[in-house]
Structure formats: C-alpha cells, structure tokens
Image (cartoon, rainbow, N blue to C red):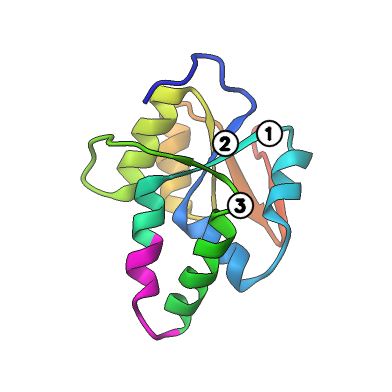
Amino acid sequence: MVLSSDNKGLVILDTNILIYSASKPFNLESEMRRMGFSRITVPSFVLDELSSIGRSFDKRGKFARLALQIARHFERVESEVAGADVDEKILRLAKEMGCAVATADAALRRRLSSEGIRVLLLKGRMIIDPDG
C-alpha cells in the first residue's frame, strides 16, 4: 500500500509502544499530535500480533488486550508487506510510505535509524524525537 511519497504528518505505531501505553497509561494520541503528526496509523499485522499476545492470560496478555482497544482509536492500515517478522514489516512499510515510526523497542529503533527512517521514542510518558 503506497499512500504518498510525502507523509511527514504520518506515523506508524508498533506493537511495543501500544503495549507500553496500556501498561503505563498516557495519552498516546495527544503525544503524537504534540509531535506534529496528523495521521496515526496501526498496521493490520501489528493488530494481529497484539491479538496473538492477548491470548495469553499473563500480565503482557492483559496489556495487549488493552492495547488493542487503544489501537482501535487510530487509522488501520491494511498491508501485505513481506517480512520475516513484524519489525521487518514495519521497517518495509515505513520505507514504502515514507513516514515515521513510534516505538519503545530499542532493537527496532536501531534498525529503523540505520535505514534513515525517522523514529519517535518513548521517554517516561512522553514521545521524543532523538534526532529532532
């Protein structure tokens, strides 16, 4: 799915940041808007991963189920990007769409940064742009 080569106002949320926002409640939408993003998206494969994690009855499963509720407030992106795992799919989708990614995952952050993709990080309960 290619939207536009100029998606500076678009951000993709990853699984990790959604689970974090459920476990340490803060207003993810207002943080994204504060950072200048007018479109906040969640890929279908992230929702699938949250559903899978949510089947567990442990604490992470509970937060994944809450994260699914949070994710429903954002635009859903149906995507069939190839990739060995969700992180790779996020990387490919962000490159294809020319947009930023919000994550709380250090390994994904490094992968995205090495590919020149703008990354937004979580610091406490605030979103920051380490390069901005």
Q: Give me the disc on residue 37.
A: 1
Image side of residue 23 versus residue 84, left or right: right
Check residue 16 for magenta coloring. Answer: no
- Give, as a three-letter code, the residue at label 2: Val
Q: Which residue is mark 3?
A: 73
Residue name at image x 40 percent, y 52 percent: 46
Identify the residue position indicated by label 2 in the image.
Answer: 11
Q: Tell me if 39 is positioned left or right of 107 in this view.
A: right
- Viewer-proximal residue among 114 and 104: 104
Instruction: Answer with the quarter of the image where residue 21 lies.
Output: bottom right
Span of residues in magenta: 50-58
Magenta segment: does it hold 51? Answer: yes
Q: Amino acid at mark 3?
A: His
Name above or below for residue 111 compared with residue 124: above
Of the two numbered discs 1 and 3 on the same chain, state the one appearing first in sequence. Answer: 1
Q: Label 2 to label 3, Cα distance in Å?
A: 14 Å
* Label 2 – label 1 distance at C-alpha: 7 Å
**65 lies left or right of 29:** left
Percent position of residue 42, x then y? 49, 45
Q: Earlier in the sequence, mark 2 or mark 3?
A: 2
Element type where label 1 sits in the image: loop
